[in-house]
Amino acid sequence: MKKSIQLLLLLMMTNITTSVVHAQQVKNELPERKQTTLGLYVTAKEAYDMWKANPDKVTLLDIRTVVEYIWVGHPEMSLTIPAFNQTSRWDDQLKYFALEPDAAFLQQVEKRFAKDAILLLFCRSGDRSARAVDMLAKAGYTKAYTITDGFEGDMVTDPENVFVGKRMKNGWKNAGLPWTYKVDPKQVVVPDAK
C-alpha cells in the first residue's frame, strides 16, 4: 500500500513538472503580446479537446466583438462576451483602428463564472485573448487559458505562398474544428444599451 501511494505521488509530481515545463516551452515560443501572467496556453485543437472531454466544466469564451462573431463565424459551443470595443481612432503603430477595453467585460464574466472556472479565451489570433486573460487574472481567476492561435489564426508570412498576408496559418477555422455563422442570441452577452 505504501509503495502504491509513493508511486501515485511520483506520477502526480511528474505530471505537474511536465505541465510546467510544457507551459514554459510554449511561453518561450510565443511572441510577448500573446503571453499571459497565468502562463496557461492551449492551441485551438487542444482547446477543443479539453472542451470535448468535459463540456460541463470547460467554457470556450469568445472575447471578440459582436461584429466578428456575426460576420467571421464562431465555434458552435462558445459563449461571446466582448472584452474590447472597436474605436474610430487610427493607431499608426498597429496600422489599424484602435481597440479599447470593454468596461462591462469583467462584470459579465464575474456574473457567470466562479474564480476557479476553466475558461478558454480566444480572439482572432491570440493577442487580445492574452490581454483578457491578464484582466481576469488580476480579478482573481486562476484557470483562464488563452488559445494562442485564436479563431482565424496567424498570417502567412512566406512571400512565395499564395496565401501570404491571409490568416491561413493555424487557428480554429484552419484546424477544421466545428464552427458556424449561425447567430444564437443566447450565446452572446451584450449589455443593454442605456
Image (tube, rainbow, N blue to C red):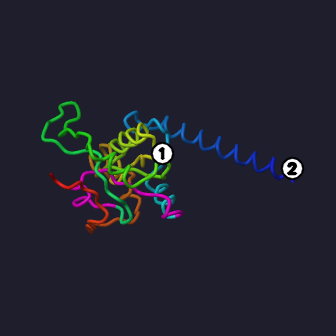
Residue occupying image coordinates x 43% and y 54%: 44
Q: In the image, 113: left or right of 15? A: left
Q: Which secondary structure, mark 2? A: helix
What residue does disc 2 label? 2
The amino acid type found where label 1 is placed reads Tyr
Check the image and name the residue furthest to the top: 93
Residue occupying image coordinates x 40% and y 35%: 31
Residue 81: x %, y % from top left: 31, 53
What residue does disc 1 label? 41
Q: Give the Cα distance between marks 2 and 1.
A: 36 Å
Instruction: Specify the quadrant of the image occupied by residue 173.
Output: bottom left
User: Number of callouts in the render?
Assistant: 2
5 falls in the magenta region: no
Q: Which comes sooner in the sequence, label 2 or label 1?
A: 2
**Viewport quadrant of the N terminus:** bottom right
Q: Which secondary structure, mark 1? A: strand
Q: Could you classify mark 1 by the number of other residues whose Cα lies within 10 Å: few (under 14), some (14-19), or many (20 or more)?
A: many
Residue 2: x %, y % from top left: 86, 49
Magenta range: 53-74
Q: In the image, 5: left or right of 32? A: right
Residue 56: x %, y % from top left: 49, 64
